[in-house]
Image: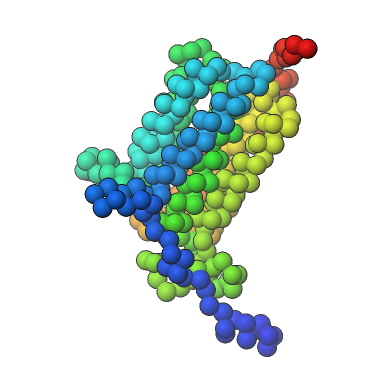
Amino acid sequence: MLSLSAAAALATYQPLHWQDLGLSPIAIDLGFFTIKWYSLAYLAGIMLGYWHLSRMIKQPGAPIAQRHADDLFFYATLGIILGGRLGYAAFYAPELFANPANLLKLWEGGMSFHGGLIGTVLAIAWVSWRARLNFVRVCDYISVCVPFGLFFGRCANFVNGELWGRVTDSTMPWIMIFPGGGPAPRHPSQLYEALLEGLVVGAILLVLFWKTKARWRPGLLVGTFTFGYALSRFTVEYFREPDAQLLDFAQRTGLSMGQWLTLPMMAVGLFFLVRGLMRPPVSVTVKAMPA
């Protein structure tokens, strides 16, 4: 039984309305040309990641030089875009393959993190093989920069009013009604993902890199990122509305597509995390600064 005060609060509760926030998917509109926040989010994540990677490799024991970072910036960008789009088609919208021209319509939305991750890993593998670099250590350094893009990307999803959460009867002050999501209040799961996948995982990796010797234990950073992202995504999927075309799949299997895709990521992440902790760190020679 609800108390009188709780019942009164529930009766007067009014969820937020996304429309009242004054948000728009379009960041710049010149009439003949528009730039969307989603595009700027990708650009901001890539540029901030490149800047931070350039700072990281100036520390003792870095596995790559600046010229390698430049190559990674180019090929990883291709991997994010191509992998993200092809991954979305493969995992969420196979009908796009029936008309390949639709795959090029990036402005219509539809990108998969897991596809972008595969594309990025292939890009790292290519640069590492060509330059004879340690693949795992390069992944360690790149993984620290990935949460920047995740944070901006999820914020852009919220600004777009897309990928909203599940219907809820919660009276928390951030519950809101999204356009296209019906009259029922929903979780702003985009912001949950931005918080967990972007800020929390990113903060952990930054502390590990800058305040500990984790970067000298091959696999520890990339294992932490992979397991941390997978755990965050698996958790948030309980609050996120499954894609409409995969709703039946989620009901039949008990887990959403996003959750199924994170399970192997958890296993891989845990493997590299434990491996990095159990193996001895790489030896690093720190040059003394001149007096």
In the rendered image, the quadrant that contains the C terminus is top right
Outermost residue, front side: 291
Provide residue 221's location: percent of width, then percent of height: 63, 31
Position of 37 with respect to 207 (left or right) is left
Outermost residue, bottom side: 4
Q: Residue at x 59, y 81 (%)?
A: 10
Scheme of image coloration:
rainbow
Asked if one can make out residue 236 in the rendered structure from this viewpoint, the answer is no
Q: Is residue 146 above or below residue 180?
A: above
Position of 239 with respect to 80 (left or right) is right
In the rendered image, the quadrant that contains the N terminus is bottom right
Q: Residue at x 62, y 43 (%)?
A: 201
Asked if one can make out residue 10 in the rendered structure from this viewpoint, the answer is yes
Please state which of residues 136 and 145 is positioned toward the viewer in this rendering: 145
Which of the 4 image quadrants contains residue 11?
bottom right
Provide residue 186's location: percent of width, then percent of height: 49, 67
Q: Is residue 104 above or below residue 281?
A: below
Q: Residue at x 42, y 44 (%)?
A: 40
Position of 206 with respect to 76 (left or right) is right
Please state which of residues 230 and 66 is positioned toward the viewer in this rendering: 66
Provide residue 126's location: percent of width, then percent of height: 44, 20
Q: Is residue 237 above or below residue 198?
A: below
All told, the count of numbered labels is 0
Q: Residue at x 56, y 34 (%)?
A: 145
Which of the 4 image quadrants contains residue 4?
bottom right
Provide residue 80's location: percent of width, then percent of height: 42, 35
